[in-house]
Amino acid sequence: MPLDTENLTLKTARLSLKPFSLRDADEAFSCITPSLTRFMTWDPPESRQQFDSIWGEWLTGAADGTEFVFAVRHRTTDQFLGLAGLHRLRTATPELGIWIREDKQGMAFGREAVQAVLEWASSVSEAAGFCYPVAEENIASRKIAESLGGEIVGHQSTPKYQSITYQIPRVNPSDSTH
């Protein structure tokens, strides 16, 4: 069942998260670099045309209620900060993901964005928890999962790195302010 996302905005003390749209494409594409993606399973798109195809699939997933990618922006300046994802929403173990542009890392924007998506996801999903795969060496991302109650449930080798999968428990939707 599709969710009404036309007016969906997740707000935190410092951030505003809205479903990805054409408005976000240029800024997102310009931030995706080889060093940003070193801890991601994917590499930077080879062209803007390839990126357009990728985010077109995100819009299709949002339309059918299975995948949501949120543009993360600073709430007061509207500066683009990164993307937060909720993938495979209609499965038993939806997946959370995040990336923050390199010049804004280390400011806890990632944790704040993941928490906002987790709270929203808990209100629209029956899942008991959410998986959060990270590169073993990505200490900052591991801290996000652990700060949200995540527990390690798996290890895996990927072509780029050793991966750890956390299971982050759902939050009580009545505690959510989004």
Image (tube, helix red, strand yellow):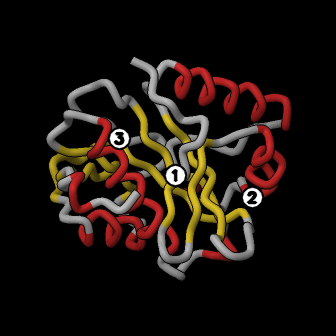
**Residue 135 vs residue 29: left or right?**
left
Q: Where is residue 96 in the image (x, y as percent from the top left)?
A: 38, 47
Q: Where is residue 86 in the image (x, y as percent from the top left)?
A: 43, 41
Disc 2 target residue: 31
Q: Quadrant of the N terminus?
A: top left
Specify the amino acid type for callout 1.
Ala
Along the line of sight, which residue is nearer the eye, 156 or 4?
A: 4
Q: Quadrant of residue 48?
A: top right
Q: How far apart are marks 1 and 2 (CA)?
A: 14 Å
Whether residue 155 is situated above or below residue 73 in the rendered picture: above
Instruction: Give me the residue at 45% from left, 21% from top.
Output: 2
Q: Distance between the residues labelled 3 and 1?
A: 11 Å
**Residue 48 vs residue 75: left or right?**
right
Whether residue 131 is situated above or below residue 6 in the rendered picture: below
Q: Quadrant of residue 19?
A: top right
Instruction: Give me the residue at 84% from left, 36% from top.
Output: 47
Q: Distance between the residues labelled 2 and 3?
A: 22 Å
The numbered disc on residue 22 is none
**Residue 52 vs residue 150: left or right?**
right
Query: Circle 1 — which element?
Result: strand
Whether residue 62 is situated above or below residue 119 in the rendered picture: above
Specify the amino acid type for callout 2.
Cys
Disc 3 target residue: 95
Specify the amino acid type for callout 3.
Glu
Q: In which quarter of the image is residue 114?
A: bottom left
Disc 1 target residue: 84
Q: Is residue 168 visible?
A: no
